[in-house]
Amino acid sequence: MSSEILTDRLIHSLKPTPGQRLELSDAGCSGLVLRATRRGIKVWVLRYRRHDGRCARYRLGEYPQMSLRSARLEAGRLRNLIHSGGDPLREQQDARDAARKDAVATFGNLLEAYWLACETGEWQPKRKIKRVSTLLYEKRLAARHIEPVLGATPISTIKRSTVKALLRDMVAKGIRAQTNRVQAIIRQVFNFAINEEIVEVNPAMGFPSLHAPKPRLKVWRDHELRSLWAALDGDHVLRTQTGVEIHVSRQVRIALQLAILLLQRRSEIVGMDIGELDFEQAVWIIPPERMKTSKPHQVPLPPLAIKLIKEAISLSKLPSDRQIGPVFPTPQDNTRPMKGEALTRAMDRIRDSIGVEDRTVHDLRRTGSTALTSERLGISPFIRSKVLGHGSDAGGGAQVSIAHYDANEYMSAKRSALAAWQTLLLHIVSKGEPNGGKRQTGIIRGMLFGLEVANDSDPSYPCIRGA
């Protein structure tokens, strides 16, 4: 880097060699450097030594917006600051930090910054972007329980006692399970703030949850399943116990039937798209963005499931040649799928019709899961987990093995399991399970040992054949 007394005429004449950067030190002002970039932009820089001995460069401004005279004056001011113990770069960073803190001065501001960072993927505490459905749920909880209390509160004044008071008020109102989720949201927001160096302490940590959750263990009993299936089968009029007519569309009834047959989550069922289905191979591939595990999930389709799905497609009012589109569209827009809440609301009405209390759509998934591993069917817990789309069951081995060294989908075993569940279910909802389930147990054992097994109702259904 050359050095000479700079003048405006000299600066105007400076032209860097193409593809190279030019730096010229001002002999008339210690530490002042003019840098001409490859694109011809001329920038003033102050070179100085920090108090820990490291060399530093501080950008002053661009020429000609900052003239030669102004650059020399600013360089002189900063040299005096450095001589008195200051550091221009540190003060610049402090100013940026203060501006960032001012921008999120209240918890409401911080919450907005947190949502944005989650949506863009900038904030990934579990090394994966939050699912859209998860964010929507968290936003609803925050709007209902957090923002009215803490939205306008300065972050610096929020203490552990502040968070506890909010949670205790929720418990006093009879809100229990959501209390833990609200605490988790506040904790995540403050973890984000700590990472951004906005705060140093997380006031939502250091104390136990105020509500001790109890795992739900309810399953549908056989006679309840029989009543439910009778209500779902077809499109007949349903009535409450007092005789009031209930309307549940055929498409919603089919979605609930598929929830029983396939044992997938309600959001996955109603989000089913024509493009995800392969009827020839009898498989439904749920894309990773709709799975909790963020991995694609292959669901074998038993014959009755295929029949119901095709019926739902015929009711969706989509063009017959359409290769993509929701199997269960909303009544208002056949290009958008229903929401899982539609099944929950329908189940509430149907339960009133059949006289069953305290049973949910998710309980259907637990019911089928329980049946799979019971003595009625004898499926291993590992294959059951694969059917359900869980990602944590290592089958008794090391978790690292299943996570990184096993790409199998276990389709044959999953197909056998769901086929056996369909057989058992149809016996339950028609005339009950014959012979104490011995026939079903024999069927599934034959499938798992590779024997030739055909489905009675549909000879074209894929089956396992021995070598």
Image (spheres, grey):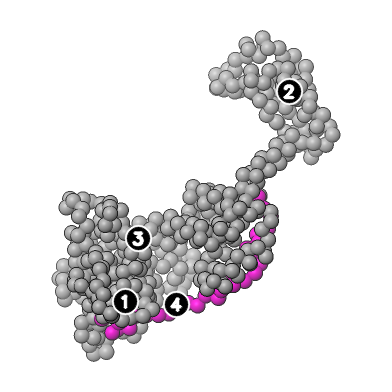
Determine the secondary structure under disc 3: loop
Determine the secondary structure under disc 1: helix
Residue at label 4? 216
Closer to the chain start, of discs 3 and 4, is 4
Nearer to us of marks 3 and 1 is 1
- Residue 219, percent from left and from top: 37, 80
Residue at 16%, 71% (x, y): give it: 458
As measured in the structure, the alpha-carbon distance from the residue carrying label 2 to the one carrying label 4 is: 71 Å
Q: Which mark is residue 96?
A: none
Nearer to us of marks 3 and 4 is 3
Residue at label 2? 32
Q: Residue furthest right?
A: 84
Residue at label 3? 339
Quadrant, the C terminus: bottom left
> Magenta part of the protein: which range?
198-226
Q: Nearer the viewer, residue 113 or 167?
A: 167
Q: Residues within 10 Å of mark 1 (few under 14, many from 20)?
A: many
Closer to the chain start, of discs 3 and 1, is 3
Q: Is residue 186 left or right of residue 129?
A: right
Give the image quarter of residue 396. Answer: bottom left
Residue 421 visible to an observer of this rendering: no
